[in-house]
């Protein structure tokens, strides 16, 4: 979601949180590790009955449940069991798995396969999967072999009881470009049920915010600069404000390998079997749900700058696209994205 690149809190956010805590019951701040990455929760507590430890336990339990569904690094997870299951008969799944899978299929169809939930075999072939095996370029014959078992249309879903089946032997699922966003949404729902109305949830760079900060202002999110400029790294490229919205970023500048002088990104085009190579280095998407933002950021990243911006503009998707050109950045913004820019 990781396919998703870090979105860091702007430095001004930390200052604002600390300065804005007077006059209320304080901030609840939690952090930990899940889905191969870190997570953090910041919430404004206005009710003294909401305590940190029970909330932390509930979050940990829910994240563990989600890992047991979606982690390809766990042999016992539901997705790993399906991938290891050789048959083409119906395979029962958890309702949450059905939710993510169904949305993944919707976006796969919407993008004409630029996003594809069956990209797993290609991810493994390129060494970006659970095996993390090699940093070498596979042959075209190897890629063609994996393309034969890649295609969201090879998966059938039923809702009652929740179950899936493959119609092509060898098809495997990979929901890493949507599951982290779903996890963010799930933790947000958990916070809602706990009586919290102002919070920010972040898992591996996927962020969702509700309400306002302790000082009454919107949550500020800094989007990372994907390349070094003038010797500076990890600088902030853009700052957006979030209120009752989510943001996710996909990019090629953290998870990649170099081979014979060429850069190979972990973001694969499921239609060709090759890493994207169109100069687009980062895409950030703002949506109502983190699950949608997660999947759409990957979709636009695969489509590239021209087609990605066209899709975002046509479908009213708030998207920031960053291109790499001769060591400099070129910024593209969809009309919907501009409404989220913070005043600076």
Image: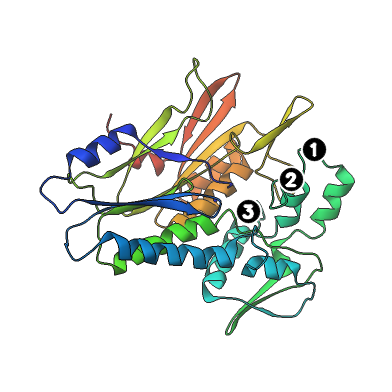
Residue 182 in view, yes or no: yes
| Image quadrant in which you'd find residue 306 | top right
For label 2, the residue is 127
Residue 210 in view, yes or no: no
Above/below status of 190 relative to 147: below
Q: Furthest-top residue in view?
A: 230
Quadrant of the drawing holding the C terminus: top left
First of labels 1, 3 by sequence position: 3
Which type of secondary structure does the marked residue at label 2 adopt? Answer: loop
Crowdedness near tag 1: few (<14), some (14–19) or many (≥20) residues, C-alpha within 10 Å: some
For label 1, the residue is 136
| Residues at marks 2 and 1 touching, judged by CB atoms closer than 8 Å | yes
Which type of secondary structure does the marked residue at label 1 adopt? Answer: loop
The percent position of residue 23, horizontal first and vertical second, equals: 10, 48
The percent position of residue 206, horizontal first and vertical second, equals: 46, 49
The percent position of residue 187, horizontal first and vertical second, equals: 40, 61
Above/below status of 276 relative to 291: above
Q: Which residue is found at the position 66% from the left and 42% from the top?
A: 266
For label 3, the residue is 115
Which type of secondary structure does the marked residue at label 3 adopt? Answer: loop
């Amino acid at each position: 979601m990781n396919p998703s690149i870090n979105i860091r809190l702007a430095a001004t956010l930390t200052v604002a949180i600390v300065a804005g805590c007077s006059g209320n019951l304080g901030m609840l701040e939690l952090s930990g590790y899940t889905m191969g990455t870190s997570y953090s929760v910041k919430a404004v507590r206005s009710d003294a009955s909401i305590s940190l430890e029970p909330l932390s336990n509930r979050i940990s339990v829910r994240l563990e449940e989600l890992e047991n569904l979606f982690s390809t690094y766990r042999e016992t997870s539901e997705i790993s069991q399906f991938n290891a299951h050789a048959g083409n008969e119906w395979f029962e799944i958890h309702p949450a798995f059905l939710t993510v899978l169904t949305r993944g299929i919707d976006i796969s169809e919407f993008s004409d396969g630029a996003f594809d939930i069956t990209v797993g075999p290609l991810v493994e072939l390129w060494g970006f999967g659970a095996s993390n095996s090699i940093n070498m370029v596979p042959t075209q014959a190897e890629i063609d072999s994996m393309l034969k078992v890649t295609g969201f249309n090879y998966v059938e879903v039923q809702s009652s009881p929740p179950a899936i089946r493959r119609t092509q032997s060898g098809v495997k699922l990979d929901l890493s470009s949507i599951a982290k966003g779903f996890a963010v949404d799930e933790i947000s729902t958990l916070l809602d049920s706990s009586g919290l109305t102002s919070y920010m949830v972040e898992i591996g760079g996927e962020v969702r915010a509700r309400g306002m900060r302790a000082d009454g202002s919107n949550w500020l999110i800094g989007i990372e600069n994907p390349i070094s400029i003038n010797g500076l790294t990890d600088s902030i490229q853009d700052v957006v404000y979030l209120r009752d919205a989510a943001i996710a970023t996909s990019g090629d500048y953290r998870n990649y390998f170099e081979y014979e002088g060429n850069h190979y990104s972990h973001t694969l085009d499921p239609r060709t079997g090759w890493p994207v190579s169109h100069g687009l280095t980062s895409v950030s998407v703002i949506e109502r749900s983190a699950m949608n933002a997660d999947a759409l950021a990957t979709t636009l990243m695969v489509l590239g700058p021209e087609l990605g911006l066209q899709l975002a503009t046509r479908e009213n998707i708030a998207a920031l696209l960053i291109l790499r050109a001769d060591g400099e950045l070129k910024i593209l913004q969809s009309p919907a994205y501009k409404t989220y820019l913070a005043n600076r």
